[in-house]
């Protein structure tokens, strides 16, 4: 017999808008049901029968009514009043067609601290629910006065011993305390009445504030939800997998977009749980399993939109770092730049650059990242299974096989990621008129730039979590610990993600840095340059940064004016040779090191309001990005811009 698939659900508190808006968004995102968060219902104009009809029309079940707080009490008269309150909620649940109510452990000083009495009171509530054909799911709040762990909650439920009483497992309440979730396997699956899931970043704050403001969907935080889900699967739980997420950003974002991310997060989590759970542990439910990821060979091309007014400065900077203009598109205002195996297309077409009030008309931006893949169509199938739109781009002149030459996925509002098949390079180049090139020190010799080390993308705060989820779910990118980097104009939250592809490729690792900018992009017009529009840049790798810096200087590059104080500080922090420091100072090269290796890097000036380039050399197994130097880099770029503006004036 084929196992039933996992049913998906989400608490209405996880979305913004009216209850009507939330239910509609939940249905359109593909959920099977939802939890009614009591404050959402109380403030809604919908009568219980209307909400039930609305859910039925949309094909949704109402899976849980929550929360019922502070049931137990050492004051017997208060407990009796609480039972009467529960009876009124049972009336409501029957009108809604909802069978299960969530009861939380109490954080009040009047909470029962005697396990036997608490089990007796829960038994009484369960008996009243049972008469109505309803069930009670008891949950341990992480900040409960007496019951605050899932093991304790389960012991109370087991002692109460009533068929209408089970436990609710909430990943946040368990993992935020650092509890070991392996004990879930000891709970009979039929006594787990409900499962609530939430991810979260690792934060140092009281757990109540953490819970109320900073939960995320699976794949957007740092909890090991795959291991948690594997324990639940092994226990034999067969109910809905539901999301209960309190998040200040989600409460302000469009409900439709948030609901889509929420549903995708559950698909992603099921795949990750499936990787952890063995066949003998997977009891009861068939987990979602999308098509597998295909191998990749690293970043091979970039496309920069500069508009007609931003190309001159961009061309100058590209020439400084060793790229040469080698061709022009026959039909579009698109210039082709090459350095070794690296390709950059500069788009000078009007209207290709995002603008807003207060933003320069030509703001160069990275619009496409090309990654070589032997099977782009496999990525399209995987993306669509995870509900991510994938556009197939057929290039003229390509020898088409059964799949597409290029599959394009939109990562941010500004940037897409292209999976480029083997035939795409020749087909794409055939659309360009290629120039005859003179011999130069950059051509005919081994390229100084060996690949793309990493790419930093500016991501507005209101789309940060969605971008993070897309990169982790579709591509399997692994996040590093997030950082708050202080600079000259404030704090930047930065998150690095990496994807290792074909180990035989020249540069198999794709590294992406997400840098958060406040609010939405349209709200950044009043930020000081170069912060307007974001903090995006492209970092190229090299084998010898001093040789590369010398060649760049010969090509007209002027090193950034790095403060002398910085090099004095380096001398104090690291045991660097004075001659090495002098060479670094002369070329504007910055430095960092950890216990694995060293990191040398230099930067260009900003192009337009924000875009810039970085050249890096990794020594040993250094895995960072020189984050400690961000403030120094930005201060130097701002100083250089002010000096340039003064000369123009």
Image: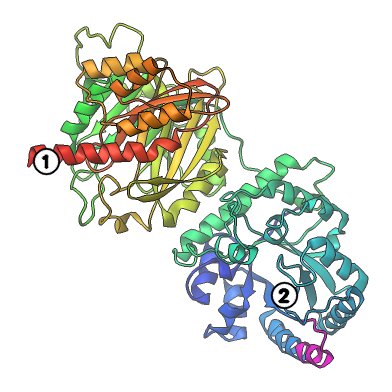
Find numbered disc 2 in the image and state the secondary structure of the residue it sits on.
Answer: loop
Label at residue 107: 2
28, 268: nearer the viewer = 268
Give whichever of 410, 559 is nearer the camera. Answer: 559
| Left or right of residue 246, residue 560 in this image | left
Q: Earlier in the sequence, mark 2 or mark 1?
A: 2
What secondary structure is the stretch in magenta mostly built from? helix
Above or below residue 614? Residue 225 is below
Q: Nearer the viewer, residue 548 or 100?
A: 548
- Start and end of the magenta stretch? 71-83
* Whole-percent x, y for residue 304 in the image: 29, 35
Say which quarter of the image contains residue 372: top left
Looking at the rendered structure, the number of numbered marks drawn on it comes to 2
Relative to 298, is 229 on the left or the right? right
Q: Position of residue 548 (x, y in %)?
A: 33, 16
Q: In the rendered view, would you say 479 is above or below 71? A: above
What residue do we see at 58% from left, 86% from top? 47
Question: Dot 2, how many residues are within 10 Å of its Cα: few (below 14), some (14-19), or many (20+)?
Answer: some
- In this rendering, does residue 453 appear at all? no
Q: Is residue 72 magenta?
A: yes
Does residue 526 appear in the picture of this structure?
Answer: yes
The percent coordinates of residue 308 (x first, y second) are 15, 38
The disc at residue 646 is: 1
The residue under the point 57% across, 38% down is 476
Q: Position of residue 635 (x, y in %)?
A: 30, 40
Asked if the stretch drawn in magenta spans residue 144, the answer is no
Distance from label 2 to label 1 (Cα)?
Answer: 62 Å
| Residue depth check, mark 2 versus mark 1: number of the one nearer the observer | 1
Q: Dot 1: what SS? A: helix
Of all residues shown, which one is farthest toward the left? 649
Residue at position x 49%, y 63% in the image? 250
Vertical position of residue 87 compared to residue 97: above or below = below
């Amino acid at each position: 017999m084929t196992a039933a698939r996992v049913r998906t659900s989400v608490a209405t508190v996880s979305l913004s808008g009216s209850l009507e808006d939330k239910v509609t968004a939940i249905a359109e995102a593909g959920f099977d049901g939802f939890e009614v968060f009591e404050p959402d219902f109380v403030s809604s104009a919908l009568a219980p029968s209307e909400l039930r009809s609305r859910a039925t029309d949309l094909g949704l079940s109402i899976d849980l009514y929550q929360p019922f707080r502070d049931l137990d009490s050492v004051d017997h008269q208060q407990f009796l009043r609480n039972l009467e309150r529960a009876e009124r909620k049972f009336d409501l649940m029957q009108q809604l067609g909802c069978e299960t109510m969530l009861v939380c452990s109490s954080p009040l000083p009047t909470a029962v601290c005697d396990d036997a009495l608490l089990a007796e009171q829960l038994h009484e509530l369960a008996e009243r629910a049972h008469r109505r054909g309803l069930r009670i799911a008891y949950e341990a709040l992480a900040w409960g006065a007496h019951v605050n762990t899932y093991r304790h909650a389960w012991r109370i439920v087991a002692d109460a011993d009533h068929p209408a009483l089970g436990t609710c497992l909430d990943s946040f309440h368990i993992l935020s305390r650092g509890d070991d979730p392996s004990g879930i396997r000891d709970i009979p699956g039929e006594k787990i009445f409900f499962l609530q899931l939430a991810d979260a970043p690792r934060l140092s704050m009281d757990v109540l504030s953490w819970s109320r403001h900073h939960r995320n969907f699976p794949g957007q935080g740092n909890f090991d939800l795959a291991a948690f889900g594997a324990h639940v699967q092994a226990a034999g739980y067969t109910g809905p997998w539901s999301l209960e997420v309190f998040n200040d950003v989600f409460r302000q974002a469009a409900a439709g977009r948030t609901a889509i991310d929420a549903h995708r997060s559950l698909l992603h989590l099921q795949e990750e749980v499936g990787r952890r759970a063995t066949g003998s542990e997977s009891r009861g439910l068939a987990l979602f399993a999308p098509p597998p990821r295909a191998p990749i060979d690293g970043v091979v091309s970039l496309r920069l939109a500069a508009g007609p007014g931003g190309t001159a400065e961009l061309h100058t900077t590209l020439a400084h770092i060793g790229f040469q203009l080698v061709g022009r598109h026959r039909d579009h205002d698109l210039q082709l730049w090459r350095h070794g195996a690296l390709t950059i297309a500069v788009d000078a077409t009007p209207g290709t650059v995002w603008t807003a009030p207060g933003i320069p008309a030509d703001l160069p931006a990275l619009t496409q990242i090309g990654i070589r893949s032997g099977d782009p169509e496999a990525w399209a199938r995987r993306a669509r299974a995870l509900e991510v739109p994938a556009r197939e781009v057929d290039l003229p002149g390509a020898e088409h096989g059964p799949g597409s030459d290029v599959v394009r996925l939109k990562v941010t509002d500004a940037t897409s990621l292209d999976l480029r098949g083997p035939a795409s390079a020749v087909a794409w180049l055939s659309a360009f008129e290629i120039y005859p090139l003179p011999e130069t020190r950059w051509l005919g010799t081994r390229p100084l730039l060996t690949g793309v080390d990493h790419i930093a993308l500016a991501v507005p705060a209101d789309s940060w979590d969605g971008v993070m989820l897309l990169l982790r779910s579709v591509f399997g990118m692994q996040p590093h610990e997030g950082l708050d980097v202080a600079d000259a104009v404030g704090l930047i939250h930065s998150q690095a993600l990496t994807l290792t592809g074909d180990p035989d490729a020249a540069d198999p690792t794709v590294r992406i840095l997400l840098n958060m900018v406040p609010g939405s992009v349209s709200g950044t017009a009043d930020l000081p340059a170069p912060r307007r529009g974001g903090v995006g840049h492209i970092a190229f790798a090299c084998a010898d940064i001093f040789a590369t810096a010398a060649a760049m200087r010969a090509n007209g590059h002027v090193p950034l004016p790095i403060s002398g104080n910085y090099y004095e500080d380096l001398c104090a922090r690291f045991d660097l040779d004075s001659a090495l420091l002098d060479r670094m100072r002369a070329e504007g090269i910055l430095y960092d090191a950890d216990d694995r290796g060293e990191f040398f890097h230099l930067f260009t000036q900003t192009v337009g309001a924000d875009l810039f380039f970085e050249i890096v050399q990794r020594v040993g197994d250094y895995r960072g990005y020189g984050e400690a130097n961000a403030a120094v880099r930005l201060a130097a770029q701002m100083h250089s811009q002010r000096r340039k503006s003064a000369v123009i004036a």
